[in-house]
Image (cartoon, coloured by chain):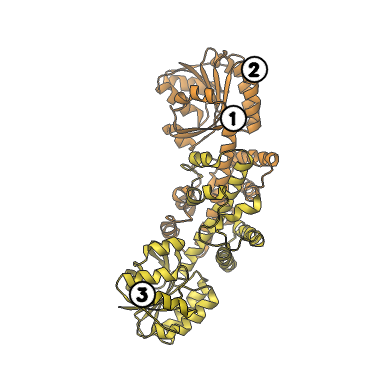
Chain colours: A orange, B yellow
Amino acid sequence: MKVAFLGLGVMGYPMAGHLKKAGFEVCVYNRTTAKAEKWAQEFAGKFADTPSEAAKDADLVMMCVGNDDDVRAVAFAAMAGMKAGAILVDHTTASAEVARELYQALSDKGIGFLDAPVSGGQAGAENGQLTVMVGGDEVTYQAAEAVLKSYAKQIKRLGEAGSGQLCKMVNQICIAGIVQGLSEAINFAQKAGLNVADVVEVISKGAAQSWQMENRALTMDKGQYDFGFAVDWMRKDLSIALAEARRNGSTLPLTALVDQFYADVQRLGGSRWDTSSLLVRLQ
Amino acid sequence: MKVAFLGLGVMGYPMAGHLKKAGFEVCVYNRTTAKAEKWAQEFAGKFADTPSEAAKDADLVMMCVGNDDDVRAVAFAAMAGMKAGAILVDHTTASAEVARELYQALSDKGIGFLDAPVSGGQAGAENGQLTVMVGGDEVTYQAAEAVLKSYAKQIKRLGEAGSGQLCKMVNQICIAGIVQGLSEAINFAQKAGLNVADVVEVISKGAAQSWQMENRALTMDKGQYDFGFAVDWMRKDLSIALAEARRNGSTLPLTALVDQFYADVQRLGGSRWDTSSLLVRLQ
C-alpha cells in the first residue's frame, strides 16, 4: 500500500516514520523541503516538492499541519494529485467546519476524508502511542483504521465528518479547567507553606485526582514548563472550541476565562511554555 | 484503649462503628441523642448525653461536626471532661485558624490536638477507606495513627497544626476546576451531538483524564446528581479556602467563580445535589 504524509512538524515527522517502519511505501512532503529530505534519509523513504506530487498514486494521504488555513491549502493541493477511491486523513486540530467542508469537496471527487485529530503529544507521536479521534463515514474509517494503528494506541470514530474535531475540543475544555484548578491549588499550597509533593501524595488517590496532577504537579512546583504542548497551540485550540460553542449554543465561562489567562502567560513571555505554565501568572 | 466519638452524621456514624469493630471501647455523643442511642444499640457500644461525659477517661476523642462554630463548641465542651495526656482528633473540614486555636488551648491543658479532615465521602466512611489529612505535632500523630487506621486507607501528616485543613482546601480547589471544566465539556459534547460515553472512552486515557471524569461524566450526562457530597457543603469548604487565600495572599479566580456558580445551583434548588450538578446551570 502506498501512503503519503504531508507536514513534518514535531508530530508529523515521527508519525510518518512509524508508517515507514510498519512497512508502507511512504512519500512525504513538507513546506520546508530540507526537513522532508532529512526524513527521507533517516527512514529510507521518498519525498516530494509539492503535496500533489507526494499524494500521487497514494491509497492513503495523511496530513498534520498548523491551522484551518493551512489545512485548506494543503488538502486542496493534495486533492489535485489524488486518485478516486483514495482517502485523505487530517490529523491537524482544526475546526469542525473545515472538516465538513473538505469532506464534501473530496466526496465530490470520489475521495474519502476523515478528520482525525490526535492527543498524546510529541511523546505519543514518537512512541507511536497516540489517541486518534475520528469523524467521517464508517466505510472510510474501516479502510483507514489498520494504517492509523502504525502510530496509535487507541482509535475511535465518534460520528460523521467533524466529530473527531468536536471530540478534541471536549478534550481541551476538560484540560483548561483541570490545569487552572491545579495551578490555583499549587500556588495556594506553596503560599500556605505546605510541601506540594506531600499534598499530591495524599490527594491524588481520590476525587481531586487527574492525569495533570500525577504528571505535572511536581514539575509545576519546581517551575518547569518545557513538557511539550505549548501555550500558543492551546490558545489556537481554545479559540476553535469557543467559536464552535457560539454555533452550538453552549456556554464555556471557565474555558473563556482560562483562554484569557493564557494570554497573560503569552505576555509574560510564555508562548512556548507548556500548558501547565498557567501557574506563573498567579505567582 | 478507651475512645469517644462526637458527632454521628453521615460520616461520624459509620466511623465510630469501625472503631467499635476494631475492638476499642467506644462511647459516642450526638446533639440529637436518639441517634446516639441507635448507634449504641447497633454496635453494642455506649453513649453519653454531653461531649464532656463521653470524653471522660477516654485516651482518644474523635469528632466530626458541621462548621467552625460547632467545632469550637463541641471541642471546648469535650475538653472539660478530658484527662491530661489524652488526644482530641477533629475530622471536621474547618478553618486552619480554628485548628491552631484549639491546638493552643488544648496544649495548655496537656491535651494533644490533631486537625484531621477526611476525603472519600460517605462511601469511604462506610467502607473504612477514608483518606485522612493531618496537622499537628509528630508525637501526637504517632500516638493516634494506629487508631485512625480503623477507618482509613491512607493517613498522612502534612505539618504543624492547621496543615490538615490546608491540605483539604487544596483538594477542594482542584475539584472545583475539574468539575466546572468537565461540566462545560459535557454540555458542549451534548450540544455538538456527540455520544458522551464514546467521548469519555476516547479521552479518559490521556491529559484530560480525572477521577471526576471516570466516576461522574456518565451520571452527569444522565442528569443524576445524588452521589454524595452536597453543594451546600462544597460552598462551606470553598468559603474556608477563599478566606484562607485572603490571609496567605494567593489568588483563586477560578475557585471564586465556581463558588458563585454553586450559588446558582442552590438557587435552582440544588442545595442537596452533589458537586457534579454544576452542569445543570449550563443547560
Q: Which residue is mark 3?
A: B140
Q: Amino acid at mark 2?
A: Asp
B5 versus A224 height, above or below: below
Residue B281: percent from the left, percent from the top?
65, 54
Q: Are marks 1 and 2 in contact (CB under 8 Å)?
A: no
Q: Amino acid at mark 3?
A: Thr
A71 versus A241 height, above or below: above
Q: Residue at x 49, y 46 (%)?
A: B209
Q: Which residue is mark 1?
A: A160
Instruction: Kindly report the distance in space between the C-alpha atoms of the residues bearing marks 3 and 2.
Output: 76 Å
Q: Do the residues at discs 3 and 1 belong to one chain?
A: no
Mark 3 or mark 1: which is in front? Answer: 1
Residue A196: percent from the left, percent from the top?
45, 58
User: Which chain letter goes with mark 1?
Assistant: A
User: Which chain letter goes with mark 2?
Assistant: A
- The local secondary structure at tag 3 comes to helix
Along the horizontal axis of the image, is A86 left or right of B15? Answer: right
Q: Which residue is mark 2?
A: A108
Q: Quadrant of the N terminus of chain A?
A: top left
Q: Amino acid at mark 1?
A: Glu
Residue A131: percent from the left, percent from the top?
48, 35
Does any portion of residue A71 appear in the rendered image?
yes
Q: Do the residues at discs 1 and 2 belong to one chain?
A: yes
Mark 3 or mark 2: which is in front? Answer: 2
Along the horizontal axis of the image, is B123 left or right of B199? Answer: left
Q: Quadrant of the C terminus of chain A?
A: bottom right
